[in-house]
Image (spheres, rainbow, N blue to C red):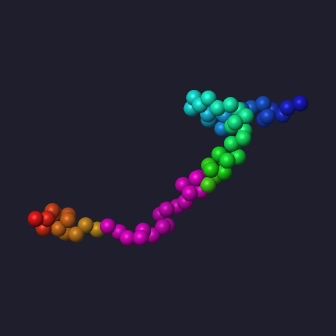
Amino acid sequence: MESESAKLPSRWARIAEARGLDLPEERLERISCILDDLEAKTRAALDRDLSLVEPMFSFRPTTSAATGEGDE
């Protein structure tokens, strides 16, 4: 007897269906582990707190650049 979770479409199948993609369930099953890994690695990169990262340099316009003087 199949478990209840086996009868439910996979998360990626639901996403594909919601986006109108015509991907067979078998194909989604084959690539779901790759999609899970990709999502986890992307999420980790996006979740980083970039406020703790020091910029390499800062841009401060010079007086002449800010006022437009000296461009002649």
Residue occupying the point 71% across, 32% down:
25
Split into 4 quadrants, where in the image is the C terminus?
bottom left
Split into 4 quadrants, where in the image is the N terminus?
top right
Q: Is residue 48 magenta?
A: yes
Q: Is residue 29 visible?
A: yes
How many numbered marks appear?
0
Which x, y percent locates residue 8?
Answer: 74, 32
- In this rendering, position of residue 58 left or right of residue 29: left
Residue occupying the point 78% across, 35% down:
5
- In this rendering, position of residue 57 left or right of residue 67: right
Q: What is the residue that sits farthest to the left in this orientation?
A: 72
Rendering quarter of residue 16: top right
Residue occupying the point 70% across, 46% down:
33
Q: Which residues are magenta?
A: 42-59
Q: Is residue 18 visible?
A: no
Which x, y percent locates residue 69?
Answer: 13, 65
Residue occupying the point 52% across, 61% down:
49
Residue 37 higher or lower than 14, as above or below: below
Q: Is residue 51 magenta?
A: yes
Which x, y percent locates residue 35?
Answer: 65, 45
Which x, y percent locates residue 18?
Answer: 59, 31
- In this rendering, position of residue 64 left or right of residue 18: left
Q: What is the residue that sits farthest to the right in this orientation?
A: 1
